[in-house]
Image: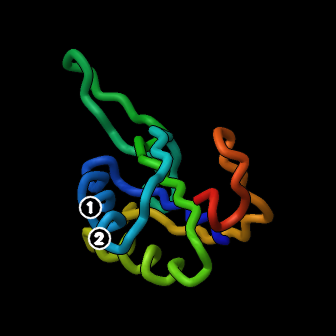
Amino acid sequence: MKLVIAIIKPFKLDEVREALSGVGVAGMTVTEVKGFGRQKGQTEIYRGAEYSTNMVPKIKIEVVCGSDLVGAVVEAIQASANTGAIGDGKIFVLDVGQAVRIRTGETDETAL
């Protein structure tokens, strides 16, 4: 099993969700986060005053899937979240040691 973590631009969430559904992902966790990379923040205007913020709003998506599906999941996220501009985000793939469905007690692949 693998944990795929993707940091994307907020307006790309619906496209990514649809792409993941298309490759067979049954569920995912979405969190609103802030951070920066090469963008180094952004400048905004609020009530006529310009100010600079160091953190840029992003969306973090977490998907746990079988090892056989991880390639399709990464490809679907990359294709649907890509704008070609700086700040499109990152994808991380980690190993998952164990998964347990709380309601039924199913474990590992059957818990997904």
In the drawing, does residue 85 fall left or right of residue 107?
Answer: left
Seen at 38% across and 70% down, the residue is 24
Which element type, helix, strand or loop, lies under badge 1? helix
- Specify the farthest residue to the top: 47
Which element type, helix, strand or loop, lies under badge 2? helix
Q: Position of residue 85 (x, y in %)?
A: 29, 68
- Specify the farthest residue to the left: 48
In the drawing, does residue 76 fall left or right of residue 3?
Answer: left
Circle number at residue 22: 2
Seen at 79% across and 64% down, the residue is 97
Query: Is residue 55 positioned above or below 9 on the image?
Result: above
Seen at 29% across and 28% down, the residue is 50
Frontmost residue, 45 versus 10: 10
In the drawing, does residue 77 fall left or right of residue 107?
Answer: left
Q: Amino acid at mark 2?
A: Gly
Q: Is residue 20 visible?
A: yes
Residue 56 falls in which quadrant of the image? top left
Q: Which residue is mark 1?
A: 18
Q: Amino acid at mark 1?
A: Glu
